Image (cartoon, helix red, strand yellow):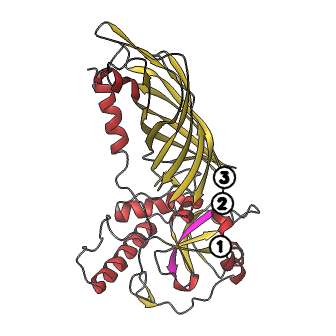
Amino acid sequence: MKFLFPAILLFLFVGLKPALVFAAPLESGFALAPRPSASQEEKIRAYSQARQSVVEAARKYEGTPYVYGGLSARGVDCSGFIVLAFRDALGVTLPRSAAGLYSWSERIPYERAQSGDLLFFRTDNTRRITHVGLYLGSRRFIHAASAGSKTGVIYSSLDEQYWSRAFAGAGRAIPEGVPGINVETGTSIADTSPPNRQETRQVNTTNDNLTLHLNAAFAPTLDLFFLNESVIRGFTSQIGVYTPLGSQFGLGLELRPELDRTLRVFRLPLTISLGVGNEFTFFAGPVLSIGRAAINVDGSQRKYYGGTSMFGIAGVTYAPQIFKTAKRSELAPYFEVAWQSYSANNTNFRFFADTSASFRMSAGIRWRMEI
């Protein structure tokens, strides 16, 4: 029974996500993906079929009401609609916000956009990406609109003045299919002129990706070695800042206050983190320990010096799913493992005591807001 609780947590966090998406455009690892040994022609055909499947999945949601943060047939927002279409068609999970999809997808000129690509828009004065739709070819797209004469999942055109002015650029999620063909209709795409050339040029400026996010998180730490009667060893938290670097990476700086009831110490790690994709974050940094770590093993007390040590902590965080909660903010359950170094005041090394003092696992909630 002692191992049941951690095992359940691990199963839930690993099993929440049907697939991991690390880079765009998607070349493999999804339903309908071509075989690695396929010829170039076979790959192009397979990607065309994947694009068509995404479009067909999206069309099934026509008329679905707009619900901010919605992710079901009862209601969707703009990014939730895209996430559902790709999940239903290809079994993959995409970033959960319009800005996240923009950072994740491959930037392409509008002239190269094909049915199944993503179109991005700036609908306010912040210059941020605030809306996303699925391109159908011939300047038409399907999306979840939140305002206007019609709301919910509808069809619109880049010929409409509002969308022409708000257009920010196109992004690719799946490699090119059959060149110049609208997979929705099977006809050639005749009109590929950009709806707004000034907006299209601005898509490639580096400032679009230099956004700053505020992070906060809290999680109980688990006593995997069951040194005490309670499965909860203490807690860990964090507050920091994070900025995306390109489409797949991000850099962060965090202060991680942590209380360890088992070792009877309070620690203040200061870490630098590297985000990879939308799920994984690797972190490391020095730790300031307050109090002397002590642990009882077989009736004998093991003591450690506190203090600061370079790279006193290193670990990885896995966030299997991200949920939008409010404008430019999100919540994500996460699972984290970390190793923290200690210096013993004697040379009598004990594997169990030293390993249990250094290793920790936690599971909690992270909040992130764009500022």
Instruction: Evaluate whether residue 274 shows in this view.
Output: yes
User: Which tag, 2 or 1, sits closer to the chain's start?
Assistant: 1
**Labels 1 and 3: the sequence-earlier one:** 1
Are the residues flagged by discs 1 and 3 in contact, CB closer than 8 Å?
no
Whether residue 335 sits left or right of residue 68 in the image: it is: left
Q: Nearer the viewer, mark 1 or mark 3?
A: 3
Q: Is residue 314 above or below residue 118?
A: above
Identify the residue under disc 3.
212
- Residue 41 percent across, percent down from the top left: 30, 86
- Category of crowding for the residue at label 2, using alpha-carbon neighbours closer than 10 angstroms: few (below 14), some (14–19), many (at least 20): few
Q: Which residue is mark 2?
A: 210
The disc placed on residue 193 is none
Dominant secondary structure, magenta: strand
Query: How dense is the environment of label 1, judged by Cα within 10 Å: few (below 14), some, or many (20 and up)?
Result: many
State the residue lying farthest toward the right. 125
Residue 207 in the image: x percent, y percent?
Answer: 68, 65
Q: Are marks 3 and 2 in contact (CB under 8 Å)?
A: yes
* Element assignment for label 2: loop
